[in-house]
Image (cartoon, grey):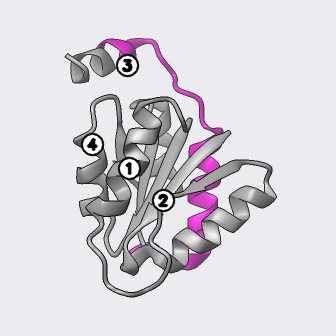
Amino acid sequence: MRIAVASDHAGFRYKTRVAEYLRREGHYVRDFGTDSEAPVDYPDMVRPAALSVAQGECDRGIVFGGSGNGEAIVANRVRGVRCALAWSEESARLARAHNDANMLSLGQRLVPEEQVLAIIQVWLSTPFEAGRHVARIKKLDQ
C-alpha cells in the first residue's frame, strides 16, 4: 500500500516511528514532513499529504499532531478525503468500517505511545463494510 505521512513538530516523533514501522511491513511511505521538532505550521505538511491521497498518488494517509484535531480539519478540507481522528483501536476500526476513512489523524499528546501501532494496524486491516454506509459517504461528496 502507498501511504502518505505528515506531521507538525508536535507529532514528529510518532510520525517517524510509524513511517519506519510501515516500511518494515512492506508499504511504500511518502513522507511530507516535517523533519524535526522545530515549530512549523501543520497545514504546510498535511495539505500536500491529503492532496496525494485525493489524487490517487497514495492509497491512504496518516497525519500526526499534538491533538490531531487541526491535522484532521486540514485534511478534510480536501475534496475526496475522509480523515478520521482516532484515539483507540475501536475508533480506528469504525473509521474504516463505517466511514471508509482514507486518512487517519493521531495526537501524540493524547494517544499513549504503546497504542499507536495497534491503532494503525487495525485501521489498515479493517475493510469498509459498504451496505448502508455507502449512501452516507456519497452525501459527503455532494
Residue 141 at x, y percent in the picture: 25, 20
Label 3 to label 4, Cα distance in Å?
18 Å
Label 3 to label 1, Cα distance in Å?
28 Å
Q: How many residues crowd mark 3 within 10 Å: few (<14), some (14–19), many (20+)?
A: some
Q: Earlier in the sequence, mark 1 or mark 2?
A: 2
Label 2 to label 3, Cα distance in Å?
31 Å
- The residue drawn where x is 30% and y is 53% is 72
- For marks 2 and 3, give the one nearer the viewer: 2
Q: Which residue is mark 2?
A: 32
> Quadrant of the image for the C terminus?
top left
> Is residue 78 at all visible to an observer of this figure?
yes
Specify the quadrant of the image occupied by residue 64. Answer: bottom left
User: Mark 1–mark 2 contact, CB under 8 Å?
Assistant: yes
What amino acid type should be assigned to the residue bearing mark 1? Answer: Pro
Image vertical order of residue 34 relative to residue 54, above or below: below
What amino acid type should be assigned to the residue bearing mark 2? Answer: Phe
Q: Which residue is mark 3?
A: 133
Label 1 to label 4, Cα distance in Å?
12 Å
